[in-house]
Amino acid sequence: MKFSWRWLNKIIDLQDKTLGEVVDKLTLAGFEIDDIEHQKEINDVIINISITANRADTMSIIGLARELSTIFNRKFLHKSYDQYNLNIVKSQSSNYISNHISDIQIIYIDNLNLTSSPKWLQNYLIGCGITPKYTLLDISQYINIKWGQDIEIFDTKTIDDNKFDINLIKVTNILYTPQDKNKEFNQFKAINDNIQLKGLKYKNKLISKLGLESNPNYHCKPSTSSIIILGSICEPTYIQNIVQILKYKTEKSCKHLKGISRNDFSQAYEETIKLILELINNNPKTNYRIYYKWHDSPKTLNSIVVPQQKIYDILGPINNQKKYLTVQDILQILEQLKFQPKYQNNTFSVTIPEYRSVDIKRSIDVIEEIGRIYGFSYFNNTIKTNYENGYNSKINIFINKLRFTLRNTGLHEVIHHSLANKTNHKNTIKLHNPLLEEQTYLRYNLINNLLSTTIYNNKQKNISIECFEIGRVFQKRLVSNNRQQYAEHIHLAGIIGKNEFSKASWSEKGSMLNWFQAKGLLENLFEHLHTQIAWEQITPKSVIEEYNNFIKISHLYRCAALKNQNTREVIGVFSELNIQCAKKLKKQYRTYIFELNLLNLIKAIKPIKHIYYTWQKYSNYPSVIRDISIILNTNMAVNITQNTILSSHSLIESVKIINEYYIAYNLRSISFRITYRSYNRTLNDYDIQSIDNNIQYLLKALK
């Protein structure tokens, strides 16, 4: 935004300050000076300043003058400019009340005989990058630049060719649609009763959509002699809702969105009337009257408490000194900021003026203002040395150990962001205001991103990688009374599979990773972490809500749930990738995937201490070995049969699987090697026969 140096000097006393000093101070105070331009034709210097979004209060001549008044501790040249701390009084001269409009005022003036714009007014506008045109438009632009308000002047004769009746003007609701902006200003129709604008109307003619745009057909002309002056301030939340619904933004709506100072409304409006009356060439027939006025109750000013020690902790000591800012220094700065400070019990309490309510909301904001006005360059810019070790949580230690183990296994770690594209999964959490359409949802698992990365590497003809990821997932589920519960978990997911995983000799071709080898890799990980895990087969009828989407991409009969041995709580899922998903990877070998809940995995840890180890006597007596074959249904778990045989007799030392082959579609033959042994004697024929009979009885029961 462009500011006139001469204009600023007319408002605030800067005679003993050079332009360079002012520019340096503004830069240190957080303002970016884009350009400085000398205009000889108007004998002025133009300063082009970039205003940040949170400092909309400085987007006017008066606003910037206030900032300079605070920085240099200077007073305004006219007391009227310094009345912005006066409370706004609720007043009205109309029955219309709206929650969306904070201030509105309409004045009717007729019998004008305006002269051309004075030279000083034209120079001020040129200094701010605006070309002067005619008196009424120049006055409106001058006021809006000076005060940052939204004040417009309309020609009543263009509104009504006959005698204009001010009593027919009213503020009312209008229904508006996004298509209206392509039509005539007065044409609008309702398609949604929720889209309601506040509009200024005369009879059936729409003069202005308050806070959005005004009708250009009713703007003033050089020959205008009868006018109405409209000044308004709309609530930013109301404008934001309208802009989002209509997807239509204007320069006027942007001004109301950033917030217009209510403290300056009355002064800006009165100065508009004063300038017009001064330029009517003393026409005795000119008269005006206030037709419409509404000022809402002022909002409660924000009060903030700032502990003195917190100021010292954040700003630190002054450079090359071991002392901090004194209480008097802090109070003086807060007075300059017009924060109405009070000091009691080592605590400062401040009241934030209305025009700074947007950017000053917390105690840290007040401390930042203290440092900014005093000058950050005067404080030590080095961080205090801290030799204390930081706290490392147990879960962080566990994750680091997990990473180390997986990397040593040969897996590569990958990292993806937590946002995902549109998905049909019912437990996905949708963001209210996403930055991109491709990042609309929070991810509900990790395996999808790992599969996408593998597919991408295949397309790029990169080497096949086995990888894992540790990250957060976000899920929701329905609880009682249609209430949804949101949950955030830390998961570990991985994808493994190789074409040549193992070789019997260098001369032979390598074999691909099979189910048992992949399962063994996970078991080695669990053993290293001292976790006690139970493996259970997942059937098509199994329901594990947290991993339903994972199970959908798994092989129908090669999918296992990992559970805590003691609590039977589900820790995760391990499976072979199903045929449909495997085709997308375009690999000639089987691929295995897993995903675990780390917090549940930690619960399954049972640390092994030396006290847990016990001595057991080794048997000096010979063993007897029996090999048997059992035909089982493919749905029957082998470990159940194995444990049943082992517990059937006290003299059975071990039961091991030595072979397996399928003999029919749903039948398989399992070969077990059973070892008999006693610790105190040699087994006789009776012992062996007794064990054999028990096993035969069990085999019949299994059939």
Image (spheres, grey):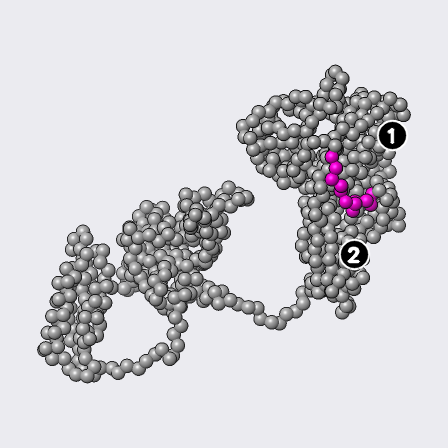
Which residue does the numbered mark 1 point to in the structure image?
A: 278
Q: Nearer the viewer, residue 153 or 547?
A: 153
Q: Position of residue 221 (x, y in %)?
A: 77, 23
Residue at (75% x, 57% y) in the render: 370
Question: Residue at the location (29% across, 57% down)?
Answer: 537
Judge from the rendering whether residue 589 lies leftward or rightward of residue 490; answer left or right.
left
Q: Tell me the kind of residue under disc 2.
A: Ile
Decide whether residue 129 is among the magenta residues.
Answer: no
Q: Residues within 10 Å of mark 2 (few under 14, many from 20)?
A: many
- Whether residue 696 is situated above or below residue 54 in the rendered picture: below
Residue 503 x/y as whole percent: 29, 62
Q: Note whether 106 is above or below 15 in the view shown.
A: above
Residue 176 location (% of width, % of height)? 59, 28
Q: CA distance from mark 2 to mark 1?
A: 40 Å
Q: What x and y, as percent, mark residue 554?
A: 33, 51
* Residue at the image position 14 percent from the left and 68 percent from the top: 695
The extreme top residue here reads 162
Determine whether, in the image, residue 473 is placed left or right of residue 202.
left
* Residue closer to the observer: 356 or 102: 102
Q: Quadrant of the N terminus?
A: top right
Q: Nearer the viewer, residue 463 or 195?
A: 195
Dot 1: within a 10 Å radius of its alpha carbon, few (fewer than 14), some, or many (20 or more) residues? few
Residue 24 in view of the camera = no
Instruction: Residue 480: tell me if it is visible.
Output: yes
Secondary structure under badge 2? helix
Residue beneath the point at 70% across and 51% down: 302
- The residue wearing badge 2 is 333
Asked where in the image residue 325 lies, by quadrant, the reply is bottom right
Label 2 vs 1, first from the N-terminus: 1
The residues colored magenta run 81-92
Element class at badge 1: helix
Q: Amino acid at mark 1?
A: Glu
